[in-house]
Amino acid sequence: GQNIDQPTEMTATEGAIVQINCTYQTSGFNGLFWYQQHAGEAPTFLSYNVLDGLEEKGRFSSFLSRSKGYSYLLLKELQMKDSASYLCAVRDSNYQLIWGAGTKLIIKP
Amino acid sequence: IAGITQAPTSQILAAGRRMTLRCTQDMRHNAMYWYRQDLGLGLRLIHYSNTAGTTGKGEVPDGYSVSRANTDDFPLTLASAVPSQTSVYFCASSEGADNTGELFFGEGSRLTVL
């Protein structure tokens, strides 16, 4: 079966750095997405990786290793507004998105 | 503001009743999707449409139906609601099913079936 694994919850301190990991086992691979979802709101797009390596976008970076079935989202200079759930999703060989359950990130002052 | 509009935002429904969740987008996107989101689970695809006039079944299609008469609208119907369909439903769209574009989500419809 297809599976996306990410930690259920993480806690970090304002101003610090946090890394959220995602491992996947899917039927084929056509890209990996990270979305942010604040409580009670819709998911919003953060990043997309299709080739191995690091994609940087401001305070957020996303890394992909296709051979290891692994990605991480790195958040720097954490702000209170970064408290949210972070969803990892992989597009399989049929171009369908398989979603992880999300990682709830709690930022403490 | 361009985007996706869902209605209703929230609804409490008696079991056995018929319910249609509405979804409209104004971005002229080809692909549209309906997901349900339940606590502790990832988003699960119910039905999708790669282009107007076509629909397909996702991971959890039973008890739901969709139609795609035009590019903009993609309603989701529960023919006879059951309590297990209590969930938050998200409609989403993308330019195409196989491009690298992101999904744009509506604000969600919270449905409670009693």
Image (cartoon, rainbow, N blue to C red):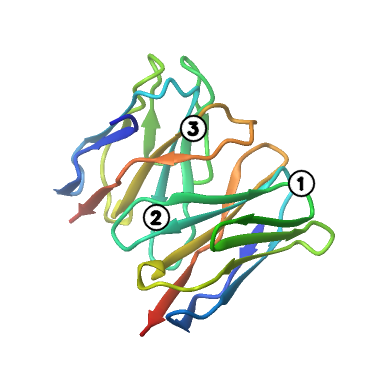
Identify the residue shown where x is 31% and y is 54%: A41
Disc 3 secondary structure class: strand
Quadrant where the N terminus of chain A lies? bottom right
Identify the residue shown where x is 64% and y is 56%: A56
* Number of other residues with Cα within 10 Å of mark 3, as a class: few under 14, some 14 to 19, many 20 or more: many
Disc 2 secondary structure class: strand
**Closer to the camera in the image, B50 or A13:** A13
Cα gap from disc 1 to disc 3, whole angstroms: 20 Å
**Residue B111 visible to an observer of this rendering:** yes
**Residue B61 visible to an observer of this rendering:** no
Q: Amino acid at mark 2?
A: Gln
Residue bearing mark 3: B48
Identify the residue shown where x is 64% and y is 31%: B99
Residue bearing mark 1: A28
Cα gap from disc 2 to disc 1, whole angstroms: 24 Å
Disc 1: which chain?
Answer: A
Residue bearing mark 2: B37
Q: Quadrant of residue A21?
A: bottom right
| B21 sits left or right of A94 in the view | left
Disc 3: which chain?
Answer: B
Disc 2: which chain?
Answer: B
Q: Amino acid at mark 1?
A: Gly
Image x and y of residue B11, in percent: 16, 47
Identify the residue shown where x is 42% and y is 80%: A14
Disc 1 secondary structure class: loop
